[in-house]
Image: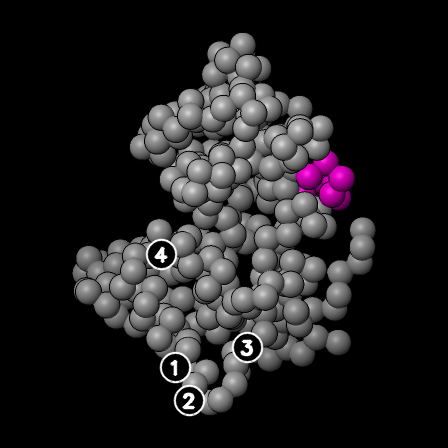
């Protein structure tokens, strides 16, 4: 039975650390950052379709990538021609179709082909399944952050911010939840940050996703949150952070 106090479900409680730096407030979801979540693409990821579909290895690329803005789209437009024929399964097809980007309901996205992003190589590709951008960047010794659409390298880390009536900005770094996909998130059979099977990493998120976090918040706030996390570990002699809710819920069925 779940314990409840004042209508709050204990299984959804997160721990946060907040501080001011350079005239802004920074708030970090420490429960998420100290968890051992890890991307399990190709290793049990069920995908984000309405039914579990681990065999196709499509991950969270089913609906293509929605560009955050014109600058994001232009950056990817400049980089995708660098993909070689042996790196991108659908390079020729994309050209035949008029390019890898399409405008849907007024928003630019990567084209969807055969149930997933056209940049997603499939199981029958000699180089194996996975994002063509990701593989190409790694093979060149470059950062995938410079290659992929922003949403693709950020998920499941998310930065929100708001400015109050006094023009003071508060930045909030947290995990990406179903709700962040809008109404479409309700149709996902599975979302990785909600399932304990994805919490199998050998390092906490604040270390394993360092590059993504720094790209979002900058070096200064990142160094400060690491100091606060690791200082607490040293002070208390153990990792005494609140376990992630996905590890406190009953284990999910293998649906």
The picture quadrant where one finds residue 226 is bottom left
- Secondary structure, mark 3, is loop
* x and y, in percent, of residue 52 in the image: 75, 44
C-alpha separation, residue under disc 4 versus residue under disc 1:
19 Å
- Residue shown at 66% from the left, 72% from the top: 248
Magenta residues (range)? 47-57
C-alpha separation, residue under disc 3 versus residue under disc 2:
16 Å
Residue beneath label 2, please? Answer: 235
Neighbor class of circle 2 (other Cα within 10 Å; few <14, some 14-19, many 20+) is: few
In the picture, measured across the screen, residue 249 lies left or right of residue 33, that is right
The label on residue 242 is 3
Residue beneath label 4, please? Answer: 214
C-alpha separation, residue under disc 3 versus residue under disc 1:
16 Å
Nearer the N terminus, badge 4 or badge 2? Answer: 4
| Quarter of the image that includes the N terminus | bottom right
Q: Nearer the viewer, mark 3 or mark 4?
A: 4
* x and y, in percent, of residue 120 in the image: 59, 31
Measured along the vertical axis of the image, is residue 155 above or below residue 207? above
Neighbor class of circle 3 (other Cα within 10 Å; few <14, some 14-19, many 20+) is: some
Measured along the vertical axis of the image, is residue 104 above or below residue 231? above
Residue beneath label 1, please? Answer: 231
Nearer the N terminus, badge 4 or badge 1? Answer: 4
Nearer the N terminus, badge 3 or badge 2? Answer: 2
- Residue shown at 35% from the left, 51% from the top: 215
**Circles 3 and 2 in contact, beta carbons < 8 Å:** no
- Residue shown at 64% from the left, 77% from the top: 4
Q: Is residue 53 magenta?
A: yes
* Closer to us: 49 or 154: 154
């Amino acid at each position: 039975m779940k314990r409840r106090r004042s209508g709050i479900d204990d299984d959804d409680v997160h721990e946060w650390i907040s501080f001011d730096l350079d005239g802004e407030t920074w708030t970090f979801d420490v429960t998420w950052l100290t968890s051992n979540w890890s991307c399990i693409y190709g290793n049990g990821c069920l995908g984000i379709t309405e039914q579990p579909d681990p065999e196709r290895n499509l991950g969270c690329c089913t609906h293509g990538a929605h560009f955050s803005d014109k600058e994001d789209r232009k950056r990817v437009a400049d980089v995708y021609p660098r993909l070689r024929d042996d790196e991108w399964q659908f390079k020729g097809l994309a050209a035949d179709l008029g390019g890898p980007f399409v405008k849907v309901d007024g928003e630019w996205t990567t084209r969807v082909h055969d149930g997933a992003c056209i940049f997603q190589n499939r199981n029958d590709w000699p180089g194996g399944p996975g994002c063509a951008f990701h593989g190409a960047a790694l093979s060149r010794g470059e950062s995938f952050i410079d290659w992929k659409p922003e949403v693709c390298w950020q998920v499941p880390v998310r930065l929100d911010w708001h400015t109050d009536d006094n023009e003071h900005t508060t930045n909030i770094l947290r995990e990406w939840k179903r709700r962040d996909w809008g109404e479409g998130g309700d149709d996902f059979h599975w979302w990785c940050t909600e399932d304990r099977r994805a919490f199998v990493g050998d390092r906490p998120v604040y270390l394993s996703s360092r590059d993504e976090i720094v790209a979002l918040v900058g070096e200064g706030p990142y160094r400060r949150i690491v100091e606060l996390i690791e200082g607490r570990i040293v002070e208390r002699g153990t990792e005494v952070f609140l376990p992630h809710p996905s590890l406190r819920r009953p284990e999910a069925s293998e649906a």
